[in-house]
Amino acid sequence: MGSVGVQRLLSPESGLVGQGVRYAVAGAFVAVVYLATTSVLAVVVGLPFREALVIGFTVQLAVHYTLQRTFVWVHDRDFALSFRRQARRYLVVNGGQLALTTVTTSLLPPVLGLSAEVIYLMTAGSMTIVNFLTYRNVVFHPEQAAELEV
């Protein structure tokens, strides 16, 4: 893909395909940030793993939100929601994802006869699609979509 194609994917005119590509790129970058932060803090710095995990999770949340707002959901119009309202909705979505992942990995393995890791991967894969649609339509939507709000 030439530079014109890349520029198009990074522009508001790229539509759903561009959003999907940017969402995947941002997700991959955030995964690296999360893993690197947690690993460096635990292995190199020597923090207990749980503390390193909490710090890594917090850092990835901040990086992820920033990329969603400034890179993934670019459009010509202003956002319908203020920064503060977006942040609240974003945290609710991610808190829900964490809660659902905790429940599915705790309850489903013995019921389905699958390992927690398999359930985790299935849940994470499903949540990737659900989060994309939720971010697109509920959190980072443009001003025009504000008319749909109650």
Image: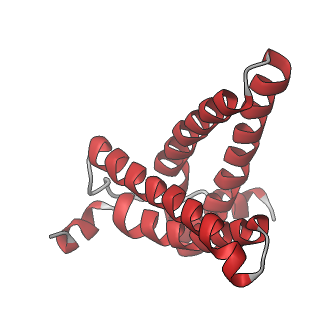
Residue at screen point 65% across, 51% down: 26
Quadrant including the N terminus: bottom right
Residue 3 quadrant: bottom right
Quadrant including the C terminus: bottom left
Measured as percent of width and height from the top left, residue 69 is found at 46, 48
Measured as percent of width and height from the top left, residue 126 is found at 61, 74
Residue at screen point 80% across, 32% down: 39
Residue 2 quadrant: bottom right
> Considering only vertical position in the picture, is 124 above or below 47?
below
Measured as percent of width and height from the top left, residue 4 is found at 71, 60
Q: Residue furthest bottom?
A: 112
Residue 76 quadrant: bottom left
* In the foreground, 132 or 13: 132
Left or right of 11, for residue 46: right
Q: Residue furthest front?
A: 110
Measured as percent of width and height from the top left, residue 74 is found at 47, 55
> Considering only vertical position in the picture, is 57 above or below 51?
below
Q: Residue furthest left?
A: 150
Left or right of 45, for residue 77: left
* In the foreground, 46 or 144: 46
Instruction: Please indicate, yes or no, whether residue 74 appears anywhere in the rendered image.
Output: no
